Amino acid sequence: SRCESLPEGAGVCLEERYVVAASSRADAVIGAVWNLSRSEAKKLVEEERVTLRGKKITDPAKELSEGDRLSVRGYGRFYFDGEEKKTRSGRGRMRVRVFV
């Protein structure tokens, strides 16, 4: 966690996490970050509860790029830092930084 060196109540705290997802689609990564099924994550996008770089997205299949910031109303925000590597089963190990 990057907030250990910050004084209480100062700045933004980001927690680095690694998640495994089938692809870098928005619904797949959102599901992996908040432990939701891809259909639950897809529904959040369809209900216009997801913003990407400050703009609402309506396509759950939107491919994320390194450095993208996503905000999901009711869940929180995170930065997508890209795919680190593939697992043996072909899924991607993704690095994200979640606002805490």
Image (tube, helix red, strand yellow):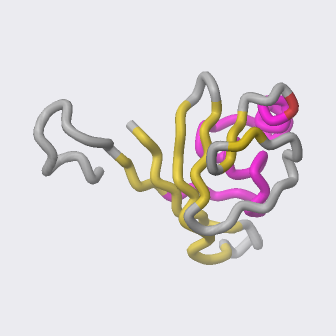
* Image location of residue 47, percent across then percent down: 83, 26
* Image location of residue 5, percent across then percent down: 13, 51
Residue at the extreme top of the image, as rendered: 74
State which quadrant residue 12 falls in: top left
Could you tell whether 77 is left or right of 7 in the image? right
- Give the quarter of the figure containing the C terminus: top left
| Total number of numbered discs in the rendering | 0
State which quadrant residue 11 falls in: top left
Q: Residue at x 67, y 66 (%)?
A: 65
Quick check: 8 above or below 29? above
Q: Residue at x 14, y 33 (%)?
A: 8
Magenta run includes residue 34 = yes
Q: Residue at x 87, y 53 (%)?
A: 61
Q: Residue at x 88, y 46 (%)?
A: 59
Along the viewing direction, whichever of 71 and 89 lies nearer the viewer: 71
State which quadrant residue 80 falls in: bottom right
Could you tell whether 24 is left or right of 32 in the image? right
Magenta run includes residue 30 = yes
Q: Which residues are magenta?
A: 18-45
Residue at the extreme front of the image, as rendered: 55
* Image location of residue 21, percent across then percent down: 70, 57
* Image location of residue 48, percent across then percent down: 80, 30
Along the viewing direction, whichever of 93 and 66 lies nearer the viewer: 66
Quick check: 26 above or below 72? below
